Image: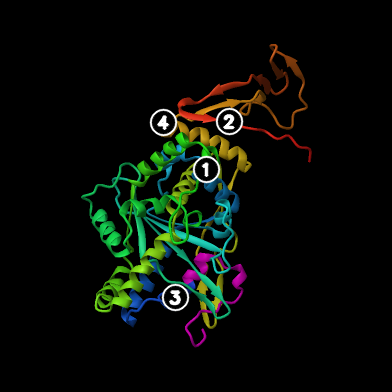
Amino acid sequence: MNGDGAVHIKRRETLILIDRLNALCQTGKLTHDLNCDTGMARKINQGTLNMLRRSQRYYIDDSVTEAAMTLAQEHPDILCGMLKRARSPYPVTWLEWDNHVRLRCIGREPDFDAPIRVGAIIERLDDSRPRYRMSSYAVNEGEDGIKSTPPMLSVVYDLDAPISDNAPESAEAALLSRLTKLPQEYMRLAMLGSSWNGPKGEVGTFIPNMFVGDQEGMQFFQKLLYEMSKHAVWGFNPIVLPAVLPTLHAATKNSFKWKEWCAGLQAYIFEDAGLWRFVISLLALLNAHNFIEQEHPGRTEGRFTYKSKSIPYLQHRVVKLKLPRKIVERQALREYSELAGQARPRHEVAGHFAESRKRGDPNCEHAWVRETDTRDRCVLCKKAFWWVRDHCRGSAEVGFILEERLVQTK
C-alpha cells in the first residue's frame, strides 16, 4: 500500500473483479471516497466483505453478456417473460461481466476511464416472494493502484407484482426524487434506458432496430418499458446508509456541498442507466439450463499476496453458452415470448429447410430416403429434414416488420 491508501496487488492480471474487491475490503480501503470516521469505515468494509463471502459467485463469459444484451435491448416484447424467469438462484448472488462488451452492444465505445469489469450483488429480501435488491460495484485502476467505493444507491425490485406506492421502498424513491430533482418516472426510465443514448446529462432509451421509423411500434415498445418499470424503485444501499446520513445532514448546512451531494446521486443514476434491465436478462439466461453451462476454474483454492498479507481467492463459477449465440437468442426469444403472453409483430418467414434435433446421430453417414415430397429421413439414425414453405406469423395488432436481405459471398 502506498501513501495515498491505494492497494497494490501482485499478479494483478490474474485477478477478477471480486478478487480486487476482496483485497480492498480486507485492507479497509473500500471506503476511500466516503467521508466517515474509522469505526464506520470498518463496519462498511466488513459488511461488504461478509456479503461477498456469503454470495454464490458467477463470472459471465462475453458470449453470455452479448446474448443477454441482445435479448434485453432488441426484443423488449419479451422483457415481461424474462422477468418471470429472472429469479436469483441463491439468497445472495454475485454476477460480474466485461463492462466494455456490454457498452459496445448499445453502440457506445467505452471512455478511457470506464471500468473494465462491473459486478452486481443480488440479495433476496423475502423468502416467500421474489423480491430482491441489486447493488452494482466496479473498481478503477490507475498507476497508483486500485480503488473503489461501495454504491450509495441500490435497486429494489419485485418479479411478481409492481411495487406499491405505499411500500417503504416507494417512500425512499420519492425522497431520492426530491434530492436529485428527477421525476420518479424519469428515474424508473433510467433503470431500463441508457444514458449513453440520450442527450448529454439525460437518460435516453435505446431504440431497437425493429422499431426504427415505426411510430406505432415505438408506442408499443414504450408501453412495455413503462409496465416493466413499475416493478422496481431506486433506494439507498443499507450497508452505506449509516455513513450517508451524517454527510447528508452536514450538507444541509452548506448550499454548495448540498448541490454537490445531490449532483453525485444524480450522476450515479445516470451511470447505472439500463443496468437493471441487463441484469434481469442475465438472470433469465442463467436459469435457462438448456442454454447455459457452468464451469469451476482450477485456481479457486489458491491465494494471492498483497505485500505481506495472503488473501484467498473467492470461489466462483464461469458461465458460458452451450450453443452458438445466434441459436440461443432465437430459441430464448421464442420461449420468453410465450411466457410474456405477448404476440410478436407480424412478419414474413422465408422458406427454409428444417431438421430434427432430438433424433439423429451427428456421426452417422446418413442414408436418406424420401418419405414425402418435402421430407427425407435417414434409415440408419432416423434423423429427418424437410422443407418449410414461406409464411407469415405474429400479430398485426402489434405491428409489422418488413425485412430486406442482402446476400453476399465471403
Alpha carbon distance from label 1 to label 4: 20 Å
The disc placed on residue 26 is: 3
Amino acid of disc 3: Gln
State the quadrant of the C terminus: top right
Tell me which amino acid carries mark 2.
Leu
Splitting the image into 4 quarters, where does residue 49 fall?
bottom left
Q: Position of residue 126 (x, y in %)?
A: 29, 50
Mark 2–mark 1 distance (CA, rounded to whole Å): 14 Å
Q: Earlier in the sequence, mark 3 or mark 4?
A: 3
Foreground: 151 or 256? 256
Label 3 – label 1 distance at C-alpha: 43 Å
Looking at the image, which residue is at 53% across and 48% down? 69
Range covered by the magenta-colored residues:
1-22
Residue 208 disc label: 1
Amino acid identity at mark 4: Gly
The residue beneath circle 4 is: 341
Q: Are marks 1 and 4 in contact (CB under 8 Å)?
A: no
User: What scheme was used to colour the molecule?
Assistant: rainbow
Query: What residue is shown at x 54% (from left), y 82% (from top)?
Result: 307
**Three-letter code, disc 1:** Pro
Q: CA distance from mark 3 to mark 4?
A: 48 Å
Which residue is identified by label 2? 402
Task: Single out the mark in the foreground, 3 or 1.
Answer: 1
Q: CA distance from mark 4 to mark 2?
A: 23 Å
Q: Position of residue 95 (x, y in %)?
A: 48, 56
First along the sequence among labels 4 and 2: 4
